């Protein structure tokens, strides 16, 4: 298992809706499985983001999550 709880989310059904839209993307509200808590976040349209670099990182003390 994972120490941060993400392993328990793998393979679970995700339900949700789009709360709002903006020029560069969407604000989403999601629920994983039958959980009582919901997650909110942003999803950006392709080409509407600037990759994070050392020069523009506003939180350099936080670890970066790498896609696999």
Image (tube, rainbow, N blue to C red):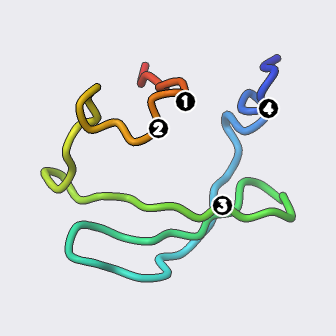
State the image quarter where residue 8 is shown: top right
What kind of element bears circle 1? Answer: loop
| Distance of label 4 from label 2 (alpha carbons) | 23 Å
Q: Pinpoint residue 68: horizontal percent, then vertical percent.
A: 43, 19
In the image, residue 55 sits, relative to residue 12, either above or below, namely above
| Distance of label 4 from label 3 (alpha carbons) | 14 Å
Looking at the image, residue 40 sits to the left or right of residue 68; the answer is right
The dot on residue 48 is none
In the image, residue 4 sits, relative to residue 30, either above or below, namely above
Name the residue tied to disc 3: 39
Residue, x 49% and y 26% (percent of image)? Answer: 65
| Distance of label 3 from label 2 (alpha carbons) | 21 Å
Name the residue tied to disc 2: 59
Name the residue tied to disc 4: 5
| Distance of label 3 from label 1 (alpha carbons) | 20 Å
Q: Pinpoint residue 58: horizontal percent, then vertical percent.
A: 39, 42
């Amino acid at each position: 298992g994972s120490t941060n709880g993400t392993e328990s989310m793998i393979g679970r059904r995700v339900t949700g809706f789009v709360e709002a839209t903006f020029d560069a993307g969407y604000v989403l509200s999601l629920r994983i499985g039958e959980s009582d808590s919901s997650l909110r976040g942003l999803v950006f349209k392709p080409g509407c983001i600037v990759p994070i670099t050392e020069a523009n990182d506003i939180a350099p003390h936080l670890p970066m999550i790498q896609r696999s």
